[in-house]
Structure formats: C-alpha cells, structure tokens
Image (cartoon, grey):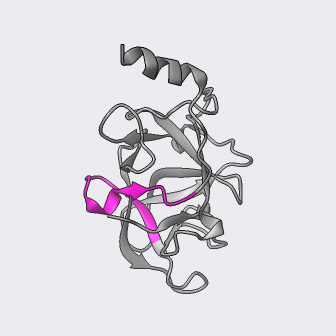
C-alpha cells in the first residue's frame, strides 16, 4: 500500500514534549524529505546500498531531527509514540530503525517496513487524524504487529549512484 509521507515539521509537540511526526497525503510535500543515514555511531558512506536487515537513521531535512521512538503512548491511537528528536542529526540509540525487506538490498521501488531497533515496533499509520493546529494530518506511531499499515515506499527524492565497490561486487557476483 502507498502511504502518506512522514512529516517532521509540525510545530505540535508529542506526548513526550518532542516534535510530532505526522503523515500527509501529498507525496511531494517539501516538508516530507528525510535523509537515510547510518545508525547511531556508525559510519555510512554515501553511495553504499542499504541492506535488508540493516539499521539506519532517518533525519528530517528541514529540522535536522531524527525519526525516534520510545515507550511513550501515542496521543490518538494509544500505540507507541514516534517523534522527531535530536539536533543536527545527532540523537541517541532510540533513533535506530531496521529496514525490513525481501532480497539483499532495499530497492528504490520496493515497499519496506521500518522496525524500531530498541523496542521492535513497526513504523505505522492507521488513519487517526489530528485537529488543530495540524488538522487533517495523520498520526504516525509504532505498532507491535506487522500489517498493511506499516508498509512504506519512497515516492521521490535524490538517489545516489551506487559506489564503485558495490558495482564491482555486483560484477563479480555474476561471474
């Protein structure tokens, strides 16, 4: 299923007092761009494909905060809160998410799940909508079970060419 983009730019605060992360229906919303980075304290070289099962961070381009979760209850659905946390891409281990996909690498056209590395919940949207000041935006939260509500797909953005090392790995794999 094609789900709304994650939006980390809301001025509204989550139950923990951290910045809310919401789902929006417009796939080209400029406030919905996230950078894929290596997990906390890991080095991730640009152009290296993301492996299925790899831990990553998603950093919101507009605010520099990371997609984050912790054992707070989300305000609308009562699931686990997802928020935006940290400064300039620096946060903590609760910013780490595992890419759940089939195959070896996260392919551009694939639907994937993001499972929180510390608490095992899946990044999800089930349709609950906020009122003021972010009327109509959907609550993004963590759910314990995998379902159709936690598939995500990249809609647009900047895609890096694979590194030379990866291209050589693919070439040798075909011999």
Taking the spot 73% from the left edge, 49% from the top edge, the residue there is: 87
Answer yes or no: is residue 58 visible: yes
> x%, y% of residue 66?
61, 50
Magenta residues? 139-156
**Is 52 on the left-hand or right-hand side of 162?**
left
> x%, y% of residue 146?
26, 52
In which quadrant is the C terminus drawn? top left
> x%, y% of residue 68?
53, 50
Rendered position, 171 above or below 157 = above
- Count the marks: 0
Answer yes or no: is residue 9 visible: no
In which quadrant is the N terminus drawn? bottom left
Rendered position, 155 above or below 46 = below
Taking the spot 49% from the left edge, 80% from the top edge, the residue there is: 130
**Is 151 on the left-hand or right-hand side of 4?**
left
> x%, y% of residue 16?
56, 61
Taking the spot 27% from the left edge, 61% from the top edge, the residue there is: 148
Rendered position, 21 above or below 85 = below
Indicate whether residue 145 is drawn in magenta: yes
Q: Residue furthest front?
A: 175
Q: Residue furthest right?
A: 88
Taking the spot 38% from the left edge, 35% from the top edge, the residue there is: 52
Rendered position, 82 above or below 119 = below
Indicate whether residue 144 is drawn in magenta: yes
Seen from the viewer's position, the closer of residues 32 and 42 is: 32
């Amino acid at each position: 299923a094609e789900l709304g983009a994650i939006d980390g730019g809301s001025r509204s605060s989550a139950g923990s007092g951290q910045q809310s992360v919401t789902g929006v229906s417009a796939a080209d919303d400029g406030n919905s761009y996230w950078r894929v980075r290596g997990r906390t304290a890991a080095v991730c070289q640009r152009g290296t494909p993301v492996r299925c099962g790899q831990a990553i961070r998603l950093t919101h381009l507009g605010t520099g905060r990371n997609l984050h979760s912790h054992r707070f209850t989300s305000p609308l659905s009562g699931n686990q809160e997802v928020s935006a946390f940290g400064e300039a891409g620096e946060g903590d281990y609760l910013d780490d998410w595992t890419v759940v996909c089939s195959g070896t690498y996260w392919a551009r056209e694939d639907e994937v799940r993001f499972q929180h590395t510390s608490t095992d919940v899946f990044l999800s949207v089930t349709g609950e909508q906020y009122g003021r000041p972010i009327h109509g935006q959907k609550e993004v939260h963590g759910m314990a079970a995998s379902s159709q509500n936690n598939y995500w797909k990249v809609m647009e953005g900047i895609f890096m060419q694979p590194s030379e090392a990866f291209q050589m790995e693919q070439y040798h794999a075909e011999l």
